[in-house]
Image (cartoon, helix red, strand yellow):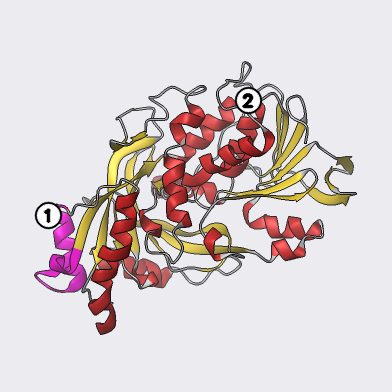
Amino acid sequence: MQRSGSHAFVLGSGIAGLSLAEILSRNGWQITIVDTSTDIGGDASRCTQNWLHTGWLYAGLPCPSAMVGCSTSLRLFQRTYERVLPRDVVNVEADNRGITYPKSAAGWFSSERMHYLFATSTYDLTPAQKETWSSFLDDVVLKRLSRLGYPTNELAELPEGLAALMRSWEGDPSGESKYRVIPSTDARIDTRRVLSSLLKLLGENTQVIAGARYEVVPVGDRTGIRIDGELHVPDLCVMAAGKAIPQLLSKLGAQEIAKSFQSVCSPVVVLERALDLPNFIRFTPNLPETINHVRYSVSSGDVSTVGSYDFHPADQRPDIRPFVEKVCGRLGVSTSTVVGSYYGTKTELVGKQERRYNHALEPVNANTYYAIAGKFSQFPLLVHELSQKLGLRIDIANESRGTLAMDVAETAPELLVRAAAAKRHAA
């Protein structure tokens, strides 16, 4: 493939598309970003809970590749963006001494960490799980995390609100004794701020076509993109369109690759105010009972979001009300405090077990790659891999940038909060 001065089409404006477009633009490529939505920022990328995954959530998987991928990605943030963004924006320090997030009003990251509530003898565990789960935590999960250099010491003193929640959750005055609470290296990441930063880094040779009606077509051993009847055959085509990738692959005759993708959706509840609780995940082998609480910053302040790891096929949207009622009951809050709920969608490559939850950047034909971030937090891995494949440099800056008069659209929690405020105002 050609390099500097060539033309790339990037299909999708989420974190995968924008991050790959940025590194190409930095290296002198002409970029055309195409998205079927009129909203810039992608679908899945704006439906996150602003949670930076650093590997903890995946430490118990049969294959640790996703855990290692998150850890590797964490250590790529500064290296990838230190030439184009100041340290008070990419405010993470990751080295042999540990992981820190220096406080910054403009930073991508918050210094507040995620607490992991490792369930050991809780109500939802079977007798067999109660016998084996604690040993599995010690022998597998915590050892894997420790090998990455992550601290795994239990919290000496629990915040009273968190202890009270565990007692209520278990219906037991000593309910906190059924958990091991460990502060993680996971933190909050302002996903919209990241997307906006990348959009503003794109150079004057970048065009964004939003609300596009396009199709991909095979042109010999290459991919063509037809927009409004005009056919373009770029030097490089990057398919970063999330759940639309299988359909695009099928259009190119790559049906077998298309079968390796799965898009799923998981429920998220947004509360009107931030609960007096730290960010936490209730970590249990029983997926539907694995619940997280993450504070989310909106223009009016912080709100609380609560998500689950129960999931459904992305083309299904089951009634979310039972989940809302369950969450509110568990947290001891009224359903009247819910401003809204939604299903967040993610697309995974599951054809090979070792790739599940992980990023993927693979060739399709002579000018095309498909790209998925796996998790929002893994996008530096995509940038690193594309740089390796195409010989791109990360130690240079874009001399002409900030010319796009476009903004990243509001995130799902922001939209729900704004809609609720408008409804109250109208009443």
Q: Residue at x 27, y 82 (%)?
A: 128
Residue kind at label 2, given as amino acid type: Arg
Asked which quadrant contains residue 122, the reply is: bottom left
Residue 14 showing in the rendered view: no
| Number of on-image labels | 2
Magenta stretch: includes residue 164: yes
Q: Which residue is mark 2?
A: 26
* Mark 1–mark 2 distance (CA, rounded to whole Å): 49 Å
- On the picture, is 332 further left or further right than 27? left
Residue 317 showing in the rendered view: yes
Q: Residue at x 43, y 22 (%)?
A: 86
- On the picture, is 394 further left or further right than 236? left
Q: Main secondary structure of the magenta part?
A: helix
Residue kind at label 1, given as amino acid type: Glu
Secondary structure of residue under mark 1:
helix
Residues packed near mark 2 inside 10 Å, few (<14), some (14 to 19) or many (20 plus) = many
Q: Residue at x 50, y 28 (%)?
A: 81
Residue 127 placement (x, y as % from top left): 25, 83
Front residue (pair 187, 207): 187
Q: Is residue 268 above or below residue 188?
A: below
Q: Which residue is mark 1?
A: 160
Secondary structure of residue under mark 2:
helix
Q: Is residue 404 above or below residue 331?
A: above
- What residue span does the magenta drawing correspond to? 155-179
Q: Is residue 126 above or below residue 25?
A: below
Magenta stretch: includes residue 270: no
- Residue 102's tag is none
Residues packed near mark 1 inside 10 Å, few (<14), some (14 to 19) or many (20 plus) = few
